Image (tube, grey):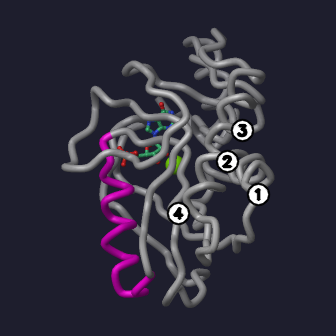
């Protein structure tokens, strides 16, 4: 597997993102709403780099019927989301690809009537964006390559890697295992 972004590069960039959130949300009630499952590694590092009081909440989004890079029908499960009225929300995900996942999440969140909503992601595949907005905070713009690690998966594997890498064909075949995914 080729390393695209090293562990130390990620660490340094997450500290900068944390400093940005610290400045933006000083004196504002902040809830970091993490999108399961890809954002959990970033969540753990980013909240410790953010030096203002904050709450953590979880939401789940998955797309069915898609391929590994193309989202299918989006399904959002907001049953774990607490009351957000009056809270300033940062929706945190691993990657902003077409942006359709984030778009669907923002639509869902409207009914929670938060004071404000911004978006933050580790990676932004800016060439692929199909929505009329961009992430408010992002770690790295990356080219249109399929990546894994630091939360990002292929067939639910590779999330634990401390770096972001581009898997080669053998990595993908090994991870596909018995499920026989392409
Ligand atoms: P969207 O196109 O922005 O809606 O992203 C859809 C979902 O596809 C993301 O939440 C990721 O789970 C997944 N995804 C997109 N690109 C990659 C990638 O390069 N590696 C792993 N997952 C990806
Ligand atoms: Mg995901």
Question: Which residue is disc 3 drawn over?
Answer: 15
- Callout 4 touching callout 3 (CB < 8 Å): no
Report the side of 53 relative to 39 (left or right).
right
Q: Nearer the viewer, residue 132 or 116?
A: 116
- Residue 96 lies, with reference to residue 82, above or below; the image says above
Residue 90 is marked as 4
Q: Do callouts 1 and 4 mark residues in contact (Cβ within 8 Å)?
A: no
Is the Cβ of the residue at disc 1 closer than 8 Å to that at disc 2? yes
Q: In what element is the residue under mark 2? A: helix
Label 2: how many Cα within 10 Å (few below 14, some 14–19, many 20+): some
What residue span does the magenta drawing correspond to? 98-114
Q: Whole-Å distance between the Cαs marked 1 and 2?
A: 7 Å
The disc, 3 or 1, on the residue closer to the chain's N-terminal end is 3
Q: Are marks 3 and 2 in contact (CB under 8 Å)?
A: yes
Q: Name the quadrant of the N terminus.
A: top right
Q: Label 2, on which residue?
A: 18
| Separation of marks 2 and 4 at Cα, in angstroms | 12 Å
Q: Is residue 92 left or right of residue 7?
A: left
Which of the 4 quarters of the picture holds residue 82? bottom right
Residue bearing the label numbered 1: 51
Res 108 → quadrant: bottom left
Q: Residue at x 80, y 53 (%)?
A: 48
Q: Nearer the viewer, mark 4 or mark 3?
A: 3
Whether residues under marks 2 and 4 lie with C-beta atoms below 8 angstroms apart, the answer is no
Quarter of the picture for ligand 1? top left
Residue 127 to residue 150: above or below: above
The CA distance from mark 4 to mark 3 is 16 Å
């Amino acid at each position: 597997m080729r390393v695209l972004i090293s562990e130390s590069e990620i660490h340094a960039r997450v500290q900068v993102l944390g400093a940005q959130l610290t400045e933006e949300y000083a004196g504002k009630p902040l809830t970091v709403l993490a999108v399961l499952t890809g954002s959990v590694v970033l969540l753990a590092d980013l909240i410790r780099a953010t030096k203002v009081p904050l709450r953590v909440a979880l939401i789940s989004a998955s797309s069915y019927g898609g391929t590994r890079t193309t989202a299918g029908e989006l399904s959002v499960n907001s049953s774990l989301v607490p009351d957000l009225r009056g809270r300033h929300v940062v929706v945190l995900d691993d990657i902003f690809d077409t942006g359709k996942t984030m778009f669907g999440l923002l639509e869902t969140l409207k009914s929670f009537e938060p004071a404000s909503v911004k978006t933050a992601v580790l990676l932004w595949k800016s060439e692929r964006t199909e929505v009329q907005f961009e992430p408010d905070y992002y770690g790295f713009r990356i080219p249109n390559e399929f990546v894994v690690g630091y939360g990002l998966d292929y067939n639910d594997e590779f999330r634990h890697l401390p770096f972001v890498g581009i898997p080669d064909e053998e990595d993908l075949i090994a991870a596909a295992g018995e499920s026989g995914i392409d």
